[in-house]
Image (cartoon, grey):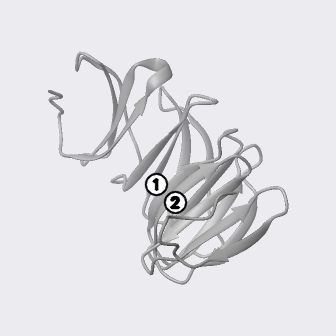
Amino acid sequence: TLTTKAEIIAVEYAENLNTFIVAEKDNSIRNYDLSGKLGHEYKIKAKPTFLKYNHQNKSVAISYGKKIDLVDMQGKNIRALTPHWKYYDFITLAWSPSGKYLAACDNGNICTVWSVDDGKIIKEWMDQAIAFSFTAKEDGIMCFNGSGDSNLYNLKTKEPKFYKHEKNGPPKT
């Protein structure tokens, strides 16, 4: 059982650190070990909406509203990521397996992929419906949306491919 100081918004497990990273409603990010003992904690600018841990470089992407901050495990700001469109709040995040790219989708159906090294946008597109899940595999980001369609964005060719929902799941890449 994990007893937190405030209501939990999002939780990520950092397996390589045996740590739970918890976004709480009081604008805090807190790290807890497996026994539930509080480790490092830090405040962020606003109430977090989502967070995603990067196993490659031990950093955390934290969305709050229309912004995303990349921070290290102590809360030190690495970089802010900003989309071209700033109308809607981010609702989901995914790291590429290499940890070099971050994908996000907002509740206005706009999906964005950034290069984490320089913060530049690699691709931004409007999906057919709100993307409720991203999965990063090999060199691509698979975006699943509420209409049952999926969009595979290939990070090598920088071209999206659209697929209709298959009975047996998304296509193999």
Residue at horizontal 44%, vertical 69%?
Answer: 89
Residue at the farthest front position: 168
Tally of numbered discs: 2
Q: Which structural element holds mark 2?
A: strand
Residue at horizontal 49%, vertical 27%?
Answer: 73
Do the residues bearing badges 2 and 1 touch, measured as CB atoms within 8 Å? yes
Q: Which structural element holds mark 1?
A: strand
**How many residues crowd around disc 1 within 10 Å: few (fewer than 14), some, or many (20 or more)?**
many
Question: In the rendered image of this protein, does residue 15 appear above or below residue 111?
Answer: above
Residue type (three-letter) at the residue carrying disc 1: Ser
Nearest the camera: 170 or 157? 170
- Residue 146 falls in image quadrant: bottom left
x then y, percent, for residue 135: 55, 54
- Residue 18 falls in image quadrant: top left
The residue pinned by badge 1 equals 63
Question: In the rendered image of this protein, does residue 173 appear above or below residue 59?
Answer: below
x then y, percent, for residue 70: 57, 43
Labelled disc at residue 158: none
The residue pinned by badge 2 equals 67
Nearest the camera: 78 or 131? 131
Question: In the rendered image of this protein, does residue 172 appear above or below residue 79?
Answer: below
Q: Which image quarter is the N terminus in?
A: top left
Residue at horizontal 62%, vertical 64%?
Answer: 171
Q: Which image quarter is the C terminus in?
A: bottom right
Question: In the rendered image of this protein, does residue 103 appear above or below residue 78?
Answer: below
Judge from the rendering whether residue 25 lies leftward or rightward of residue 47; answer left or right.
Answer: left
**How many residues crowd around disc 2 within 10 Å: few (fewer than 14), some, or many (20 or more)?**
some
Nearest the camera: 153 or 165? 165
Residue type (three-letter) at the residue carrying disc 2: Lys
Q: CA distance from mark 2 to mark 1?
A: 6 Å
x then y, percent, for residue 25: 24, 49
